[in-house]
Image (spheres, coloured by chain):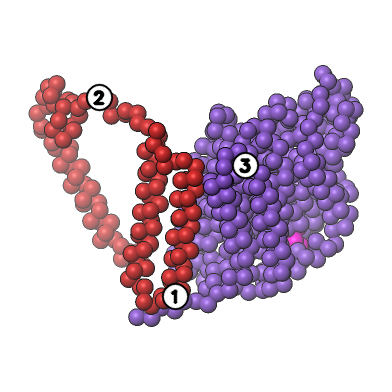
Amino acid sequence: MTLNIPSFNLASIGPWITLSIFAIAILLADALSPKGNRTAAPLLALAGLAVAGFQTISLWGKNGLDFARMVYVDNFSLFFYMVFILGTALTVLISLQYLKDYGKNLAEYYALLLFATVGMMLMAAGAHLIMIFLGLEVMSIAVYVLAGLFREDARSNEAALKYLVLGAFASAFLLFGMAMLYGAAGGTLFLNDLPGRLTAGFKPLTLLAIALLVVGFGFKVASVPFHMWTPDVYEGAPTSVTAFMAVGVKTAAFAAFARVFFLAFPTLMPDWTMVLWVLAVATMTLGNVVAIAQTNIKRMLAYSSIAHAGYLLVALVAANQLGAVSLMYYLLAYTLMNLGAFGVVILVGRKKDSYLSIYDYAGLGAQHPALAAAMALFMFALAGIPPTAGFVGKFYIFSAAVKAGYIWLAIIGVMNSVVSVYYYLRITVLMYMKPAEADLGPINFAPAVTATLLLTAAGVVLIGVFPGFLYNLALNSVKIFPGL
Amino acid sequence: MLINYLPILIYMLIAVGLLGVIVLLSELLGKKTHTVQKDIPYECGMDPIGDARSRYTVRFYIIAMFFIVFDIEAIFLYPWGVVFKPLGWFGLVEMGVFIAILAVGLAYVWGKGALEWE
């Protein structure tokens, strides 16, 4: 008996290996070092992310498959690697002081963040649906645990349990869809092989498979009507974990969503664009309208994150090159502006999240002008007001929709953006035009969080004013989709 | 295609139907007597003691998780043993990595004091 071991190159998955090794090292260092010594974990996590970032840059430009055609090594996945690494690094920075205040600065937290990042990378680079599913699970299981980090807090427990039960349910849908697809395609789940196998005529099995995949991915990106978990989980989870979920999980799910649908189902585009059109409109509208009624800042940002999933679905519906480019650009912009906003929420929340109502922001402009200015910038960016990254991202998305002939979708999207201005600007109005109800007291400007705010604020303006560089990077990355 | 599975469907219908008829007949024709002895839950012929939902320490879950982890390790080791020669050094290294990761897990729980029962 001889076995053929496929040739592979470990460098193709270098970032995954690095992050896994660093995560394991964090766990070991914590378990074997004397009690109370917890300074090493965040530093190790940041070091691992830096090394993974360098590896990603050195892989840039490669175009191919590895590990028996299971893994893509292409600019599309590498672009998302960078977004994940950036998002995770910023999450580490905003977590530090926050977790210390709670007495929960655990090494496991950082290890789980890194493991979740590995899962996200798997999702962005998976060339086989099973790989994508594995990535989804690696990411989700880590995030389920993170959501329940505050074990003594009933809300955190509720968030973790709700996310686990509903997430497992959604994973089952995704897996079931893959099983249907396996049957419809005659026994293959390689994304490269699927379009060739799915051309022949009307096939109920294929459509069922696509519907189930939409449910599975729709849950992870928090699109209506699969969004029910989002507000409760985002509100109950620790704020830093909420930030990580809002940017990381959503980005990873959209990366896989786009890759699967653009690459595997271009021949069935009329079928799935119609479904996603409806989902996009429902998601944008519900997210924005319900966000208006929220008085808890975390809940408001949760509904805002649902609304943003809607905008991103518009990019998927457009299903052209500009649509894919706008998706990538917007996800990066969203990572920056949302992490920035959550950074401010952590700072204003202070000891144990005591100030989470939006009315706690009243008078912030007078007492902490720099912090208020940063929050105002992130709110403007989320609302899509120039010259921020949010504006450019929305501009790309809606022009992609117009270019693809979805005029009405673009109009509905723009109208939704106008609705969103109300609740984003309300925070700004509260900060600058309402006197504080009481003295806000000192805010502990931890250096790491302050640095994050500076970085994200600069990033939001910079890529908003000079989007060309990223646009070209993204355009260069979406060449892999022949069907667009 | 699908029509080839028709016999299986018919077989399933017959099986379910037959079962239903038997249960229904015994329900209709059977004689029903209730005694205290008959109504207690059957537990290997013993008299039941206490509630089935008794509480036990959460540490058993940790032990159960260890068991699963090392059970999986054993499950992976057996097929590897069968193809040990053809896989050669590659397989040895791969399994080494796999076992090393599990060993790290063990070291972690040991270091965290999860193996102590007190």
Mark carried by residue A37: 3
Q: Quadrant of residue A438?
A: top right
Left or right of A409: which side holds A127? left
Residue A57 visible, this orientation: yes
Please give the residue where the numbered disc 1 appears in the rendered image: B89
Find the residue positioned furthest to the front.
A34
The residue shown at (21%, 47%) is B17
Q: Nearer the viewer, mark 1 or mark 2?
A: 1
Residue nearest the viewer, comparing A217 with A18:
A18
Q: CA distance from mark 1 to mark 2?
A: 56 Å
| Disc 3 secondary structure class | loop
Residue extent of the magenta highlight: A322-326
Q: Is residue B77 above or below residue A24?
A: below
Q: Considering the image in quadrants, where does the C terminus of chain A appear?
A: bottom right
The type of residue carrying mark 1 is Trp
Left or right of B94: which side holds A431? right
Q: Are marks 3 and 2 on the same chain?
A: no
- Drawing shade for chain A: purple
The spot of residue A209 in percent (x, y) is 50, 58
Question: What is the chain letter for disc 3?
Answer: A
Badge 3 crowding class, 10 Å Cα cut-off, few under 14, some 14 to 19, many 20 or more, is: few
Q: Considering the image in quadrants, where does the N terminus of chain A appear?
A: bottom left
Q: Is residue A414 above or below residue B34?
A: below
The spot of residue A116 in percent (x, y) is 59, 51
Residue nearest the viewer, comparing A334 with A292:
A334
The type of residue carrying mark 3 is Asn
Please give the residue where the numbered disc 2 appears in the rendered image: B50
| Disc 1 secondary structure class | helix
| Disc 2 secondary structure class | loop
Chain identifier of the red chain: B
The residue shown at (38%, 78%) is B86
